[in-house]
Image (spheres, rainbow, N blue to C red):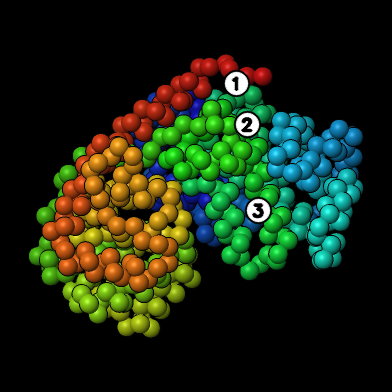
Amino acid sequence: MRVCLICEGSYPYVLGGVSSWIQMLIENYSDIEFIIWSIATNKEEMSDYKYNLPSNVKKVKTFYISEHRIEGHYRKIKLDSNDKEVLRNLLIGDLNSIEWKECLCLMKKYQKNLVNILMSKDFFNISLELYRMGYSKTSFNEFLWSLRGMYFPFMKILSEDMIEADIYHAVSTGYAGMLGSIASNVKNKPLLLSEHGIYTREREEDIIRSNWLRGSFKELWINFFKKMSLITYNQANIVTTLFEVNKTLQIELGCPEEKILIIPNGVDINDFSDLNPRSEESKKYFNIGAILRIVPIKDVKTMLLAFANVKKLVPNAKLNILGNYDENPEYYNECVQLVNMLLIEDVVFYGQANIKGYLNEFDLLLLTSISEGQPLSVLEGMASGIPYICTNVGDCKSLLEGNCGDNLGLSGFIVPIMDTQALTKQIVYCAKNKERISKMGMVGKARVSKYYKKSYFLEKFKEIYEELGESKAWQA
């Protein structure tokens, strides 16, 4: 069996999170051949593999978005009346009326000419119609090129030669999901979609906060990503998600409920049973750990601001931040400058490190993200018997407090996003109540052992691959 894993902004160029999940999947299915189809930003940031690729990875194909521009000469394309109406539906149609099958058929029909369509008279006329419907406060030329710029990377990616595979497995919606949808449609093969975070919601948050887009253009971009997700949800044979809240969001965004399977992340608790004894040096401190990439979405600055307050109340506190800081050097430098500006002592950035070699040293772990799914780093910390303080994002509340029917108790504390005072208060409480948080650590270990088993996660995905590989139900 050959599976094509389609990744966007992650494996094999970015460490942690979804990439760790992909690596675990590949390593444990040695009897399956994998091809990686990676969508990346640029070669400067994403050229070196961050993982040792297992031998069953037969090929990595990377599409660098920044290498492609709207330039040069384009063939004149004239759509027939039916195709023109499908294009109009994609660009102007409301989310509830998107004709997703027809959109995929149009993309299949014109696969090698999709970029030419953007420069066609038909696209121009439909864009002018959309412009007059509510975007005329800016110049039409600006609007037209903004619309072309929005669809160009998408159309360019879909113009690629399709990789041969028995199953296409997209690890998000967005560009990866649409590429999987087209490949599935062109090759008449099944599509599996796995969402960790909800891509559409994450892009919506990014767009709302952005400075490079103005008012109505933000709405245009948000709807663009919603349409791409809607098409992927409908083309996918099976959609997996990590927890119930995500499932609800997927349904709200148009995913048929009967397609969705909840398969939580999992870890092997035995992998964390042989941690080294704590060193005498670390016993001098109340050691706080943070296992994360140093990027804005992890909100390291709130963590640092809170720790500055903690140091005034818990002088022996130490903050140990483990994780890659090469992904966003500018943000990392801002974090270092913040530490220096506030004169915060006992903050150490270790960079990428062997996490298991440090876990035994920590009294407490922190996660201050503004967006998450179901973080593997939290499950690994819980498997090590370490209590956590997390922001109320993704499935963190369920991990620390349990779902309905889970009477194990608390394995940590939840705080609001970007709330420095709440985070400070809980860290200080933990520092002054070591016996209580030690019991919380044992609750976390018990919860992982009972509800978040790696063996269950691997078993369920193996079943899905076998079902899709053998079934003919997906064929047209």
The residue drawn where x is 66% and y is 29% is: 185
Give the label, 3 or 1, closer to the camera: 3
In the image, what residue type sits under mark 1?
Answer: Trp
Give the label, 2 or 3, closer to the camera: 3
Quadrant occupied by the C terminus: top right
Question: Disc 3, disc 1: CB below 8 Å?
Answer: no
In the image, what residue type sits under mark 3?
Answer: Ile
State the SS at label 1: loop
**Which residue is denoted by mark 2 in the rendering?**
235
In the figure, is residue 221 to the left or right of 145? left
Whether residue 59 is visible to the viewer of this picture, yes or no, is no
**Which residue is denoted by mark 3 in the rendering?**
222
Give the Cα separation between the discs numbered 1 and 2.
10 Å
| Above or below, comparing residue 345 to residue 121 in the picture | below
The residue drawn where x is 16% and y is 46% is: 274
Where does residue 337 sit, x and y in percent of width and height?
41, 79
> Could you say which quadrant of the image residue 420 lies in?
bottom left
State the SS at label 2: helix
**Which residue is denoted by mark 1 in the rendering?**
474
The earlier-in-sequence mark between 3 and 1 is 3
Label 1: how many Cα within 10 Å (few below 14, some 14–19, many 20+): some
